Image: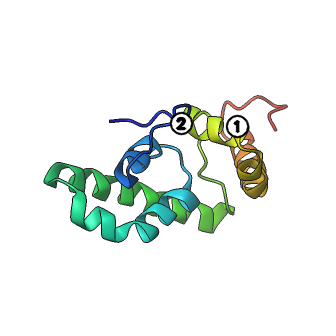
Amino acid sequence: MVYNVMSNSIPTPFDLLVNFEDSGNATFVSYLFQAKSEWLSKNLSPEQRLRCEAIRKRLEVWQEQERQEGPGAALNLSHEKMMAVFNERRWVRMKFANQIANAERVASLQPGAPANAT
């Protein structure tokens, strides 16, 4: 099951990891692995465990990018679910404001980025 951030259903920690696995949101994905480690260790099928390991490897890449380019550098600003959360929950957007600004800066430096990207 993939969680719809617009619905009222309660996702499992695994659902959240899957939904945000290509978000670049190292802060949130790292939090899920830390805060929900007991749930993850007790409730996943072998296939889900493999998926979590793949997500964890992506997290390591994001964390390295953020060590080099600053917090938020790995954020995928095209990730619909994450941006929906940022746009619908003002407190979340405020919490991530500096990271979003840095992600915009990093994206503007990428080859092919518009000259006026911010």
CB within 8 Å, label 2 to label 1: yes
98 is higher (above) or lower (below) than 112: below
Q: Which disc, if any, is residue 88? A: 1
- Give the x, y percent position of residue 98: 78, 56
Query: Which quadrant, please, contains the C terminus?
Result: top right
Question: Residue visible at 72% across and 54% down?
Answer: 96
**Residue at left 53%, top 36%?**
5
Which of the 4 image quadrants contains residue 50?
bottom left
Q: Nearer the viewer, residue 49 or 77?
A: 49
x and y percentages locating residue 76 in the rendered image: 59, 42
Task: Please state the horizontal and vertical placement of residue 101, each as a whole percent of the image.
Answer: 78, 49
**Relative side of 17 to 94, left or right:** left
In this figure, which residue is indicated by the disc labeled 2?
A: 5
Residue 87, above or below 27: above
> Could you tell whether 14 is left or right of 28 in the image?
left
Residue 32 shown left or right of residue 72 in the figure: left
Quarter of the picture holding the N terminus: top left
Mark 2 to mark 1: distance in Å? 10 Å
Question: Residue 37's spot in the image, x, y percent?
Answer: 35, 69
Residue 67 shows in the view: yes
Q: Is residue 77 visible?
A: no
Secondary structure type for disc 1: helix
Q: Amino acid at mark 2?
A: Val
Q: Amino acid at mark 1?
A: Glu
- In this view, the residue farthest toward the left is 46
Point out the tag, 2 or 1, that comes first from the N-terminus.
2
Q: What numbered label is drawn on residue 72?
A: none
Q: Residue 78 lies in what quarter of the image?
A: top right
